[in-house]
Amino acid sequence: MTNGVPTLEAQKEEAPVLEGAERTRERRAYVPRSDIYETEDAIFVLADMPGVDEDSIEITLEKNVLTIAAYAESSDLGDYEPVYAEYESGDYTRRFSLSDQIDQAKIEASLRDGVLKLMLPKAEPARARTIKVKAD
C-alpha cells in the first residue's frame, strides 16, 4: 500500500521449455495471462502481450493444439537507464488444446493495445438428415 492506495504488482510466469524443444532466441519466454469466456456461438480468449505488434505474432493450429508465439521487441531508451520496470521484456508462448466442438476453419484473431483476442466459433451440431435409397 502506498499512501493508503493499494498497489498492484505485475506478475509474469516464465514459459517452460518443452521436452525435446529448443528455443531459437536467447530471450526469456513468458506465458501470457489470459481470460477465457464463452457465448452461445463462440469461445473467446484474451491474452495480454504488451509490446507485441501484429507482425510479430504467429498462431498455428496442429493436431487440435492452438499455439501462440509472439516476439516483443525491447524499447530503445537511448541514453537513459530504467530505474524501475513493471516487467522484463521477453517473448510469449502459450498453447491451448481444442475440442471438436470448435470450428477450426473459422478461428479469427485480432490485436489491440497489447491484447490478443481469439474468437473460436463453436461448430454446428451434426444435423439429422434423411438418406434417400436409389433403386438399381
Image (spheres, rainbow, N blue to C red):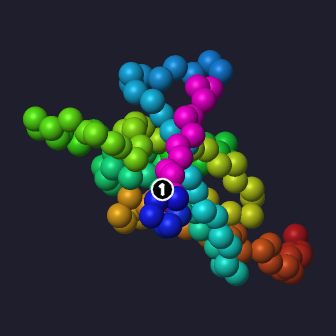
Q: Position of residue 31 (x, y in %)?
A: 55, 43
Residue plotted at (41% across, 43% down): 87
Which residue occupies the foreground of this view, 123 or 131?
A: 123
Residue 72 visible within the image: no
Q: Is residue 17 magenta?
A: yes
| 116 left or right of 85 in image | right
* Residue under pointer 1: 48
Residue farthest along the front direction in this orientation: 3
Q: Position of residue 113 (x, y in %)?
A: 35, 64
Q: Which residues are magenta?
A: 7-18
Picture mark count: 1
Residue 28 visible within the image: yes
- In the rendered image, the vertical position of residue 95 relative to residue 101, given as above or below: above
Residue plotted at (39% across, 62% down): 111
Three-letter amino acid code at the position of disc 1:
Asp
| 131 left or right of 54 in image | right
Asked which secondary structure carries label 1, the reply is strand
| 21 left or right of 101 in image | left
Residue farthest along the left direction in this orientation: 79
- In the rendered image, the vertical position of residue 130 relative to residue 93, given as above or below: below
Residue plotted at (67% across, 78% down): 39
Residue plotted at (28% across, 39% down): 83
**Quadrant hosting residue 40:** bottom right
Q: Residues within 10 Å of mark 1 (few under 14, many from 20)?
A: many
Which residue occupies the foreground of this view, 103 or 34?
A: 34
Q: Position of residue 75 (x, y in %)?
A: 23, 42
Q: Position of residue 57 (x, y in %)?
A: 39, 47
**Viewport quadrant of the C terminus:** bottom right
